[in-house]
Amino acid sequence: MQTLCDTVAQALRVPGDAMRDVLLAVPLPIARFLFLAIPAMLLLWALLMDPSRLRGQFSEHGRTVNLRPYILIALAIQIAIYTLL
């Protein structure tokens, strides 16, 4: 079993090292921007989405709930936390 693990680890070492080198080449301000831009784009997408697509239905009660406020609050909190990091 150990031989199999060593073989797999050795096979993944080259692509793993290449991926690490590529990711280390990205400047930190760009990485931070992308880290904040993705939730911000999701927030904008949720704001612009058709309200009928943002409704969830509870099976036990049979009523629909507008999920937009919950989506916006969750993404806003995520953006705020990521901004502080």
Image (tube, rainbow, N blue to C red):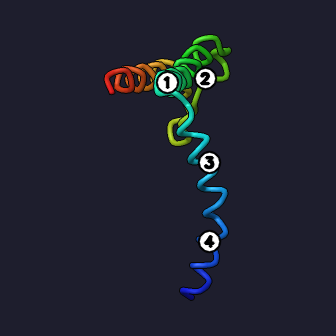
Q: Which residue is mark 4?
A: 10
Q: CA distance from mark 3 to mark 1?
A: 33 Å
Contact between marks 4 and 1 (CB within 8 A): the answer is no
Q: CA distance from mark 2 to mark 3?
A: 37 Å
- 2 vs 4, front mark: 4
Give 25 or 58, whichever is nearer the viewer.
25
Q: CA distance from mark 4 to mark 1?
A: 43 Å
Contact between marks 2 and 1 (CB within 8 A): the answer is yes
Which residue appears at 64% of the width and 64% of the height? 12
Could you say where residue 17 lies in the image, as x and y percent from the top left? 59, 54
Which residue appears at 57% of the width and 79% of the height? 5
Q: Which residue is mark 1?
A: 71
Which residue appears at 50% of the width and 36% of the height? 61
Q: Earlier in the sequence, mark 2 or mark 3?
A: 3
Contact between marks 2 and 4 (CB within 8 A): the answer is no
Q: Which residue is mark 2?
A: 54
Few, some or many residues within 10 Å of mark 1 (<14, 14–19, 20+): some
Give the left or right position of residue 29, taking residue 42 as reference: left
Could you say where residue 49 lies in the image, as x and y percent from the top left? 65, 15
Q: Which residue is mark 3?
A: 19
Residue 58 badge: none
Q: CA distance from mark 2 to mark 4?
A: 46 Å
In the image, farthest residue toward the top: 48
Q: CA distance from mark 4 to mark 3?
A: 15 Å
